[in-house]
Amino acid sequence: MAKTYDAAAGGSPLLCIAHCHRQTYFVLAITPDAREKEAKQIQVTEFLPHHPGGSKIILQLAGKDATEEYDPIHPPGILEENLKPEAKLGRVDLDTLPKQHAPSEEEASDEAPPPLDSLLNLDEIEEVASRQISRKAWAYYFSAADDLVSKRLNNEAYRSILLRPRIFIDCKDCDPSTTILGNKVGLPIFVSPAAMARLAHPSGEAGIAQACAKFGAMQVISNNASMTPEQIVADAKPGQIFGWQLYAQIDRQKSEDMLARINKLSDKIKFICLTLDAPVPGKREHDEKSKNIASTLPVTSAVMDASASETTSGGIGQQLFMGTSPSLTWKETLPWLAKHTTLPIVLKGLQTHEDAYIASLYAPQVRGIILSNHGGRAADTAPPAIHTLLEIRKYCPEVLRSIEVLVDGGIKRGTDVVKALCLGARGVGIGRAALWGLGAGGPAGVERTLEVLQTELETAMRLLGAHNVEELGPQHINARALEQQIYDGPAGLEKFRIWILSKL
């Protein structure tokens, strides 16, 4: 696989060398203004025990060029931001360092990628990206839990829903714009939080933002982004809409500090997306087999502590979850959030009608929910989002009137978007698709992804006789085949209503 990553283009350190001398550990990194001649020398001895991925990975890289391990997954400037001034020991002449000629693990392909406009669907874009990005990046993006059943069903479920086209309707005009949480967007398609975009391309999450701006699409920034939120929104266009994904940390102060930063960006970041569908990491076997960079990640989560990370095997996904709190509750977490932000809250990862109903009782603090099984990356055989949407329509349709419902996962065609909208979804999220677009062609690849979906969406709307998103409804589809697969037990809602109201 050819690697598209070019650290120099990313604006963050080009060279990172771990070095040990008498139990004092250093990280050497070239700054953008001096990467030709010299590098900063930073002493990280005191930081080693606090490294989110554990100290082992730093020590393993002692004496080696760690650029490819470090740079794509650390936001530019993170060393300067997080280490004390006294840790910066000065500069080092790179010519004095031993030259390394280690063979690359991945050989570049001589085959040039095809023109983006020749890629006609999201599967073709993914195929090109898979050849362009590194093996470890592919493993992280592609992987899902266990046997990948939920990942597969996320898309297959949409195939079971049939469209009901109409005739003799003037379909010359078609407007795909809508509003999400009261914010005007050009498409009912948004980019879901997807971590580590710079593994695909040096422009990273900022490149995705650049593409979204062209279409007026909303972007939810991952808590585990490879760039800082400030960097991602820096070049946002007027009116461009972002959300911020939050993984509540065991160390709540870390989350509170991040919320304070996000509050200062509220002119661009319009809501907090609290992710709840992965309180512990799923077993992602493709990713675990690519564990060579697993411990290098800057953000930690799940039920592991720092000492556990020293011996934990696993891929990027496992490491991203070290530090995330597995003990969030309705009773405690939402009041805690209310103390630290006035931004609207969107809950991500609901997979049952019961939880959707409970969430609706917390309006207006909770303004919306995203139905999602974490891209099939958490509990394998968990239901696709479209199943949960049908459950809500069956057991508690009032939820669709009290809060906004969005869906995420498995979207590969504009017809998939239409089907979700017909069933009451306010918007539809794409996660991997944006990363594949980035890997296939940088920001232009993400633009191509959105262009394909927009074209297919508008074609489907015209064939259904819908001039705008608001006109789409259940009369435009036949979901009987899929309805047979959804939960058919008792609704069980009254006890939740009584319990919640007693607590409010």
Image: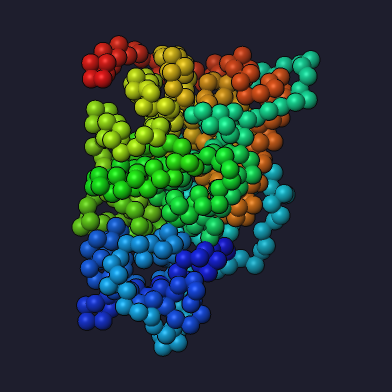
Residue 30 lies, in percent from the top left, at: 44, 74
Of 503 and 73, the residue lying toward us = 503
Question: Could you say which is closer to the camera, residue 281 or residue 5?
Answer: 5
Identified at 53% across, 21% down, the residue is 424
**Vertical position of residue 401 compared to residue 312: above or below:** above
Left or right of residue 241, residue 259 in this image = left
Could you say where residue 134 lies in the image, as x and y percent from the top left? 51, 61
The reply to whether residue 351 is in sight is no
Residue 232, compared with residue 146, is above or below; it is below
User: Viewed as shown, does residue 159 lie left or right of 243?
Assistant: right
Residue 442: in sight, yes or no? yes
Q: Residue at x 35, y 13 (%)?
A: 491
Q: Can you name the residue that lies furthest to the bottom here? A: 96
Q: Residue at x 28, y 72 (%)?
A: 87
Q: Which quadrant would residue 369 be assigned to in this image?
A: top left
**Figure coloring:** rainbow
Figure quadrant of residue 9 = bottom right
Q: Is residue 486 left or right of residue 479?
A: left
Task: Please state the total of marks drawn on the protein image.
Answer: 0
Q: Dividing the image into 4 quarters, which one contains the N terminus?
A: bottom right
In the drawing, does residue 284 fall left or right of residue 306?
Answer: right
* Quadrant assignment for the C terminus: top left
Residue 432: image location, x then y, percent: 51, 45
Residue 244: x percent and y percent? 43, 42
Please give the name of the residue rendered at 44% of the width and 62% of the height, measured from the top-left corner.
Answer: 76
Residue 144 drawn above or below residue 360: below
